[in-house]
Amino acid sequence: MGIRVIAEVGCNHKGDMQIAKDMIRTAAVYARADVVKFQKRNNRELLTDEQYRTPHPNPANAYGDTYGAHREFLEFDVAQHAELMAECALNGIGYSTSVWDVTSAVEMASLKPALLKIPSACNLHFEMLDVLARDYSGEIHCSLGMTTQDEEAQIVDFFEARGRAKDVVLYACTSGYPVAFDDICLLEITRLKDRFGDRVKSIAFSGHHLGIAADVAALALGAQWVERHFTLDRTWKGTDHAASLEPDGLRRLVRDLRAVEGSLKYKASEILPVEQVQRDKLKWRAKPKSVAAA
């Protein structure tokens, strides 16, 4: 399998189904990404009553008077996710979503997408992980931001005990929006490969940084998936837009990853055909001595 690129819409659709569908088409047709990913939350289950009733910490990004109202405004129901999944199929791109709680895991597993994502914030929610291990047969992708190495081992052990570790993709990730280059820590990809590479399906990279240079390096280090937040306009209201790629950034990311992936190989022969032409014209060779001169 070649490098796979996930365009994470998350809640950058601003609660608007038409924007969400436009983003699917843009990621599929213009950028040629492999998967579009959304988010699914049951906010009453995920938040305490106090959290639900408290105002958004950044009112400029709020879509409701309380944090709960804000989150509900951005939430799509199961039927809408099924509609988004159909839109993805229509445009030849994979559909996925992150799940943040048990109810959402059950609901999204019922749609049977090819992959579901466990966000960094929820990777120790073992009741939810058990639902995915038991009731969902697709790939289980798991981000490891803000997670200790002991906790990483617990997660892998958990899926191994249930016979599902070979369906798990682990993502090196730094949880921040946006993340400075000093904090991306790409060598975590190598560490995860060394520690878990033979125990899980593959190792991946989820980035919240600016630009696309680090993603190419992630590929060179062995990441088989690259996930980036995606928006149609980085100036839109919302927390994640500033750490997201706009359409042309996503297009260039996919282009560069595919090009670099094609270059990561050994020469098929000592002298490649493209070199042979130049060798015949330019390569210095000692001239044979004549018999007379000898």
Image (tube, rainbow, N blue to C red):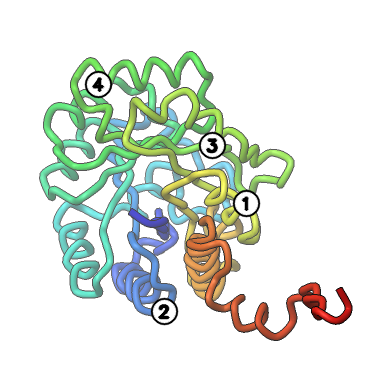
**Between residues 224 and 89, which one lies in front from this camera angle?**
224
Q: Is residue 226 above or below residue 126?
A: below
Residue identified by numbered label 1: 209
Give the distance between the C-alpha atoms of the residues marked 1 and 2, in whole angstroms.
Answer: 22 Å
Give the distance between the C-alpha atoms of the residues marked 4 and 1, in whole angstroms.
Answer: 31 Å
Which mark is in front, 3 or 4? Answer: 3
Q: Is residue 168 above or below residue 23?
A: above
Q: Earlier in the sequence, mark 1 or mark 2?
A: 2
Query: What residue is drawn where x is 26% and y is 61%?
Result: 94
**Image disc number at residue 127:** 4
Q: Quadrant of residue 155?
A: top left
- Residue type, mark 1 in image: His
Residue 42: x percent and y percent?
27, 39
Residue identified by numbered label 2: 30
Determine whether the residue tagged by mark 2 lies in a helix, strand or loop.
helix
**Between residues 85 and 165, which one lies in front from this camera angle?**
165
